[in-house]
Image (tube, rainbow, N blue to C red):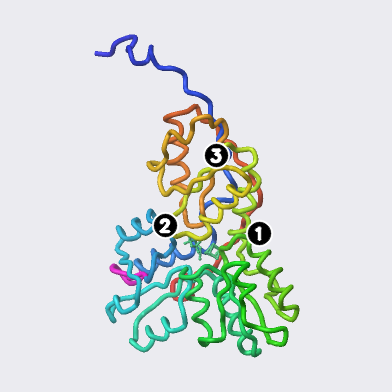
Amino acid sequence: MNAPFPAQDAAAKPLLPLEVLIAAPRGFCAGVDRAIEIVERALEKYGAPVYVRHEIVHNKFVVDSLKQKGAIFVEELDEVPEDAPVVFSAHGVPKTVPAEAERRNMVYVDATCPLVSKVHRQAERQIEKGQHILFIGHAGHPEVIGTMGQVPEGRITLVETLDDVAELPFTKEDDLSYLSQTTLSVDDTRAIVEALETRYPQIVGPKAEDICYATSNRQAAVKQIAGGADFLLVIGAPNSSNSLRLVEVAERLGTEARLIQRASEIDPAWLEGVGTLGLTAGASAPEMLVREVVAKLGEWRDVRERTITAAEEKMVFKLPRELAD
Ligand code: 0CN
Ligand code: SF4
């Protein structure tokens, strides 16, 4: 039997308003869409299990959904049986990986983002020209391992910081070039390139910068909303380079920001005194997680959403021939 005036409702205070500024673009980029579709189509074509070398993109929700469909994630090729198909992640692989797959007669599909592959080709070309490459990136990241693994050892040097630039052993006479990881901070990379050009006026770079459109658009969108927000949430994984950079962008503009993987990680204490909240998602975070966060916020506050658009994105990448219709 329903009580006409439940005591609970009578006591409930109206929820405080919360304006949520949602960044656009946010979430999946064309390279992530393509990589996930490659795993799904490989499962359809070859049947489960399909092995995937490294997380296809750096997102646990995406990886868990693909596991449920029959994908098995491993870190190295030697964990894959010879007779099973394997997909290489969006971040790219060193040349030794496809070479090893071919040596073992394995069926493999390369889900490396075409914009990462473009950097691989630039690296090969710079080496052919006899240049030594200064590669701007974060040590240990799979994309860095993949790109550095396109060229012979000793022909490429990793540069992570401005201090690294000051310590490089090269001279103004050396034939130098630079390239970068695709998911870096636009501002930090510009500063490093300037320092390289000051120290080595002869250095040559790529025609267009290597930071991808998705990375720079997501950073630009955070720049637009951070100033007007009291706090900012970035949906993304702790190993997702492009997502981490979004937190940094907000913090550098003086807005406290947190990286979260799921809505359940939000501490309601973060919202104390917050009237306007910024919200975005890294390139590997599905939109479903943005909706989950907005719904969670709605449990505590009277949410009003507003989308702030910094750029339009229409990029779509073709699938590899073996999986196209
Ligand atoms: O989060 P991601 O899987 O990768 P990183 O930002 O760590 O590079 O996003 C997709 C980007 C690529 C490649
Ligand atoms: Fe490609 Fe950029 Fe997306 Fe990485 S973040 S998959 S480089 S489009």
* Identity of the residue drawn at 49% across and 81% down: 149
Q: Is mark 3 within 8 Å of ligand 1?
A: no
Q: Give the class, few, some or many, for how many residues have Cα within 10 Å of label 2's Cα (few <14, many ≥20).
A: many
What element does badge 2 sit on?
loop
Q: Quadrant of ligand 2?
A: bottom right
Give x and y (percent) for residue 32: 49, 61
Q: Is mark 1 within 8 Å of ligand 1?
A: no
**Membership of 57 in magenta stretch:** no
Q: Tag 2 or tag 1, which sits nearer the N-term?
A: 2
Reading the image, the residue beneath label 2 is 59
Residue occupying the point 29% across, 63% down? 70
What residue range appears in magenta?
Answer: 45-52
How far apart in space, not on screen, are marks 1 and 2 (Cα)?
25 Å
Q: Earlier in the sequence, mark 1 or mark 3?
A: 1
Q: Image check: 234 left or right of 215? A: left
Q: Is residue 192 left or right of residue 302?
A: right
Going from the N terminus, do you reach mark 2 or mark 3 first?
2
* Residue found at x 24% / y 13%: 1
Residue 237 found in image quarter: bottom left
Helix, strand or loop under label 1: helix
Q: Callout 1, which amino acid?
A: Asp
Please give the label number shown on residue 187.
1
Amino acid of disc 3: Phe
User: Residue 282, percent across and down?
Assistant: 51, 54
Q: Which mark is residue 231?
A: 3
